[in-house]
């Protein structure tokens, strides 16, 4: 009986990204060994963080309020917009301190195999923003994967008749890799030496 219960527990942990079987066991047993107070504190922390983080209504990145700090800031360059796949990519680009504009999170990439077409991404929202915001350059910072490249090309094609300068990061980040795993220096280089499309 206990075995079945444990198996269920480990399977749940194992379903998290980046947590293999070994890590699931280590984390699982650690949680089980925690005393009631420690465990409750851990759960309360997770709960309160999960409850206070939402997605920014404008850019789609993580925020503690309806509009994130970057969108609300008047210190950011409104002429430059960095388009990324996921909300966490904003943090990776921010860490490079190489970009001072605003962001737009697509919420994924075009992937026909997974049934994700352009309509499932925040591309419509991007086009709406471009009607209102004085954007002069868009940095397409989707990951240099097959899907990331295809998504960047798709957006570039949509905007080919606009006056907006389109650039693509790729330089320095190995093909097939993601922003998450590029070290800060490589990602800085990739942003600095972006190519015009
Ligand atoms: Zn925002």
Image (cartoon, rainbow, N blue to C red):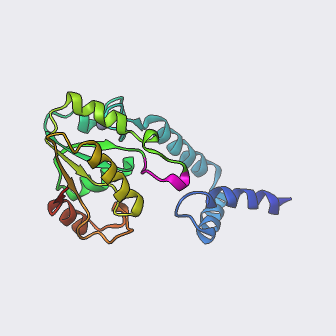
User: In which quadrant of this rendering is ligand 1 seen?
Assistant: top left
Q: In the rendered structure, does residue 163 fall within the stretch colored magenta?
A: no
Q: Which range is magenta?
A: 108-114
Q: Which residue is drawn at 35% across and 44% down?
A: 105
Q: Percent from the top left, x then y, of residue 57?
A: 36, 31
Q: Quick check: 86 left or right of 116? A: left
Q: Which residue is drawn at 17% across and 60% down?
A: 195
Q: Where is residue 142 in the image (x, y as percent from the top left)?
A: 33, 55
Split into 4 quadrants, where in the image is the C terminus?
Answer: bottom left
Quarter-of-image position of residue 188: bottom left
Can residue 113 be found in the magenta stretch?
Answer: yes
| For residue 182, above or below residue 45 | below
Q: In this view, does 81 lie to the left or right of 147?
A: left
Would you identify the image quadrant in which residue 150 lies? bottom left
Q: In which quarter of the image is the N terminus?
A: bottom right
In the image, is residue 137 above or below residue 95?
above
Q: In this view, does 76 lie to the left or right of 43?
A: left
Q: 14 or 163: which is nearer to us? A: 163
Seen at 24% across and 71% down, the residue is 172
Q: Is residue 76 visible?
A: no
| Residue 82 position within the rendered picture, expressed as x and y whole percent measured from the top left | 24, 47
Furthest-right residue in this view: 1
């Amino acid at each position: 009986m206990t075995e079945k219960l444990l198996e269920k527990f480990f399977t749940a942990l194992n379903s998290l990204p980046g947590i293999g079987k070994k890590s699931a066991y280590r984390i699982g047993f650690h949680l089980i060994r925690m005393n009631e107070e420690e465990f409750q504190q851990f759960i309360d922390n997770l709960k309160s963080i999960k409850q206070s983080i939402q997605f920014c209504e404008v850019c789609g990145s993580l925020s503690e309020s309806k509009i994130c700090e970057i969108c609300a800031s008047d210190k950011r360059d409104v002429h430059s917009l960095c388009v990324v796949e996921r909300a966490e990519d904003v943090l990776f680009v921010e860490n490079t301190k190489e970009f001072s504009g605003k962001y737009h999170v697509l919420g994924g990439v075009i992937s026909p195999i997974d049934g994700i077409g352009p309509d499932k991404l925040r591309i419509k929202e991007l086009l709406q923003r471009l009607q209102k915001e004085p954007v002069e350059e868009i940095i397409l910072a989707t990951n240099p994967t097959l899907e990331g490249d295809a998504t960047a090309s798709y957006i570039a094609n949509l905007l080919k008749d606009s006056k907006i300068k389109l650039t693509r990061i790729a330089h320095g980040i190995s093909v097939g890799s993601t922003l998450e795993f590029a070290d800060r220096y490589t990602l800085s280089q990739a942003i600095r030496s972006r190519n015009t499309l």
